[in-house]
Image (cartoon, rainbow, N blue to C red):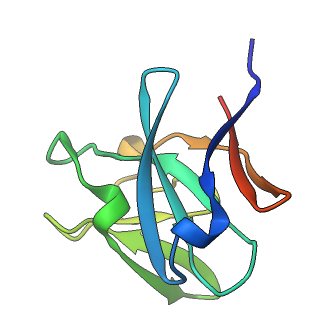
Amino acid sequence: MSHWTAVCQLTQILPATGVCALVNGQQIAIFRPRDDEVLFAISNIDPFAQASVLSRGIIAEHQNQLWVASPLKKQRFRLSDGLCMEDEALSVATWPVRVTAGQVEICA
């Protein structure tokens, strides 16, 4: 059963960056692309390198969609749904994320 888990304060995630949180045994990368409360949560595991690095990737916009590029092999993952631009079979999981009273919460 899924439930909302508090992971950090919104102010702890700088705009245009990501952080990693361990939620129910899963490494989840949380991204804050802009200086607002719109956040995205995807798996932190790069499926190409099998490394925990996606939270350290670079956020970019392509065709009006936000993506993160893996810092290792540069494959891009769409933040809204985890789709891998280079190989759809290696897309990553996503989770609902919200901000409640300044607290970032993940539903996992």
Question: Measured along the vertical axis of the image, is residue 3 above or below residue 90?
Answer: above
Name the one closer to the observer, 28 or 10: 10
Q: Residue furthest right?
A: 101
Q: Position of residue 14 (x, y in %)?
A: 51, 78
Q: Position of residue 106 (x, y in %)?
A: 67, 41
Indicate the quadrant containing the C terminus: top left, top right, bottom left or bottom right.
top right
At 22% from the left and 71% from the top, the residue drawn is: 74
Q: Position of residue 68 (x, y in %)?
A: 41, 71
Name the one closer to the observer, 9 or 5: 9
Q: Residue furthest top?
A: 1
Q: Count the labels in the image.
A: 0
Question: Measured along the vertical axis of the image, is residue 81 above or below residue 65?
Answer: above
Indicate the quadrant containing the N terminus: top left, top right, bottom left or bottom right.
top right
Tell me if 8 is positioned left or right of 69 in this view.
Answer: right
Quarter assignment of residue 3 = top right
Quarter assignment of residue 7 = top right
Tell me if 49 is positioned left or right of 82 in this view.
Answer: left
At 77% from the left and 62% from the top, the residue drawn is: 102
Tell me if 50 is positioned left or right of 82 in this view.
Answer: left
Tell me if 32 is positioned left or right of 38 in this view.
Answer: left
Question: Measured along the vertical axis of the image, is residue 38 above or below residue 35?
Answer: above
At 25% from the left and 54% from the top, the residue drawn is: 53
Q: Position of residue 32 (x, y in %)?
A: 58, 72
At 62% from the left and 85% from the top, the residue drawn is: 34
